[in-house]
Image (spheres, rainbow, N blue to C red):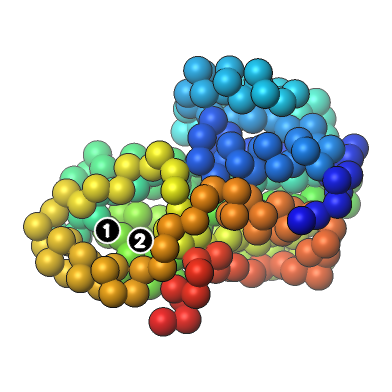
Amino acid sequence: MGSADRFTGKTVIVTGAGSGIGRATALRLAAEGATVVAADVNQEALDKLAAEIDVRPVAGDLTSEEVIGRVVAAAGGRVDGLANVAGIMDGFVPPAEIEDAVWDRVFNINVNAPMRLTRAVLPLMLEAGSGSIVNVASEASLRGSAAGAAYTASKHAIAGFTKSTAFFYGPKGVRTNAVAPGPTITNIEGAMKSELAAQRVGPILQVVIPAPVTADILANSITWLLSDDAANVNGVILPSDGGWSAV
């Protein structure tokens, strides 16, 4: 566990904060003293979170520039940390079966929204000379056998975007890293919508996949990377997967 006041005086944006890993991260940050800007598409979920902890909730679809503007405005001119957690799956659909609408939606939420929110907060971090960004990648960012084509490609893209951001802005005091979760108990849709996926991916997952963990386990990794405890860590894709990546 980190210090109870590790984030005192700091403002951190968390996307996908209404449920799963995002919610667990928001709770952990608030418990350690952060001012949390909690963004999620689900207003009801944000209302429940706001009833538990003091947050600045922003409801809306992060693929919208207007919503991103409201998220940054809610931070009040200071952003010490950004956790890009929000994401969706793709039904494990292989390349020959993927539909344009699914591909575009997965990339809009998993890649374009984090890019635009990162782009929006970087000027504030660079002006302050400090900041920490943590993206949520996936085991699918490390291999081709953990999801469908759209999700796998999107998480490889987030890994690359993480490293590029780390390279450009690390010398200016802004660290950027990613966590690659393994099986985690969340409400993200994970059903296989392809017979080929069931034939190819299913047997592999049955053999190598570790037991699912609760979302707070992932929040531990995310908040560590956000904190000054990870001051010398930049450009890392950190597996938090129970050893799956070692198989």
Extreme bottom residue here?
247
Q: Quadrant of the C terminus?
A: bottom left
Q: Quadrant of residue 136?
A: bottom right
Crowding near the residue tagged with mark 1, few <14, some 14–19, many ≥20 C-alpha atoms within 10 Å? many
**Considering the numbered disc 2 on the image, is that residue within a helix, a strand or a loop?**
helix
Left or right of residue 9: residue 43: left
Q: Residue 85 at x, y = what percent?
A: 55, 45
Which residue is located at x 59 percent, y 68 percent?
A: 238
Residue 148 circle label = 1
Quadrant of the frame with the N terminus: bottom right
| Residue 197 shows in the view | yes
Instruction: State the image coordinates of residue 61 (x, y, percent, origin top left).
Output: 47, 27
Residue 143: quarter of image? bottom left
Categorize mark 2 by other alpha carbons within 10 Å: few (<14), some (14-19), many (20+). Answer: many
Question: In the image, 190: left or right of 223?
Answer: left
Q: Residue at horizontal 28%, vertical 74%?
A: 207
Residue 156 in view: no
Position in image of residue 72 (x %, y %): 69, 30
Dots 1, 2 in contact, CB < 8 A: yes
Q: Amino acid at mark 1?
A: Gly
| Picture coordinates of residue 146, whole percent (x, y) | 33, 65
Q: Nearer the viewer, residue 74 or 169?
A: 74
Residue depicted at x 57% and y 41% = 22
Residue at x-position 64% and y-position 30%:
38
- The quarter of the picture where residue 32 lies is top right
The alpha-carbon separation of the residues under discs 1 and 2 comes to 6 Å
Identify the disc placed on residue 166.
none
Name the outermost residue toward the left: 195
Q: Is residue 87 above or below residue 234?
A: above
The disc placed on residue 152 is: 2
**Amino acid at dot 2:** Thr
